[in-house]
Amino acid sequence: MAKAYDHLFKLLLIGDSGVGKTCLIIRFAEDNFNNTYISTIGIDFKIRTVDIEGKKIKLQVWDTAGQERFKTITTAYYRGAMGIILVYDITDEKSFENIQNWMKSIKENASAGVERLLLGNKCDMEAKRKVQKEQADKLAREHGIRFFETSAKSSMNVDEAFSSLARDILLKSGGRRLGNSSKPSSTDLKTCEKKHTNKCSLG
Ligand SMILES: Nc1nc2c(ncn2[C@@H]2O[C@H](COP(=O)(O)OP(=O)(O)OP(=O)(O)O)[C@@H](O)[C@H]2O)c(=O)[nH]1
């Protein structure tokens, strides 16, 4: 029987408790959203297959608990991940400051070549914004990674973010190359910025 997919990529979401990791995964895998907050205990995963560059990519997306008390369990999963998504909440400055700590945690626990992506979630809550897009852009550039503002609630940029990470992993793993590098050039980042600026404000 033919294989239902060409590649299997394991992705992991990390970030402070309450930033919306579970909601982002549920939006991506099931196209659903729930306002009720049930904090993740330990770790869980969901699956969705996407088409990238004519290849069927099965994404196994692991959801980690943001709470400190689960850290030992969750960091054990870093090593198997091919892509790690760092999430903060645009209405919560502390969650953005902590991205530096999550970056450190990747360095200490993940495989050296892991692809990373930065997401500023809850961008539907523009009125409560505490973290400016420019701050996150700067941080992403410093680390040479892509950045999107997303909303699990409105779906804004959710598919785009997961697909962009999957595409970077595919290119890195020897799939058809689109450019000279899987890392974003400053032109790439500008395009990304332009494409998504001002698209994300539901109030
Ligand atoms: N307005 C808005 N609320 C969101 C969004 N994403 C998540 N939320 C809300 O934020 C709360 C926390 O979301 P979760 O997805 O459970 O957060 P988490 O990061 O998985 O939290 P832990 O499991 O504790 O690590 C819930 O009440 C969600 O409804 C979003 O994009 N917009």
Image (cartoon, rainbow, N blue to C red):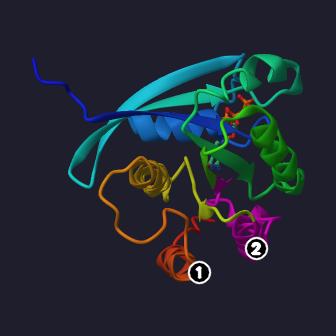
Report the front residue among 72 and 125: 72
Residue 35 visible within the image: no
Residue 139, image quadrant: bottom right
- The quadrant where ligand 1 appears is top right
Residue 113, image quadrant: top right
Q: Which residue is mark 2?
A: 138
- Residues in magenta? 118-142
Residue 14 in the image: state x and y as whole percent. Answer: 70, 38
Residue 20 in the image: state x and y as whole percent. Answer: 66, 41
Tell whether 49 sits left or right of 29: left
Q: Quadrant of the C terminus?
A: bottom right
Residue 159 in the image: state x and y as whole percent. Answer: 42, 51
Above/below status of 53 relative to 23: below
In the rendering, which numbered label is found on residue 104? none
Q: Quadrant of the N terminus?
A: top left
Report the front residue among 21 and 165: 165
Residue drawn at the location 82% of the way across and 23% of the way down: 71
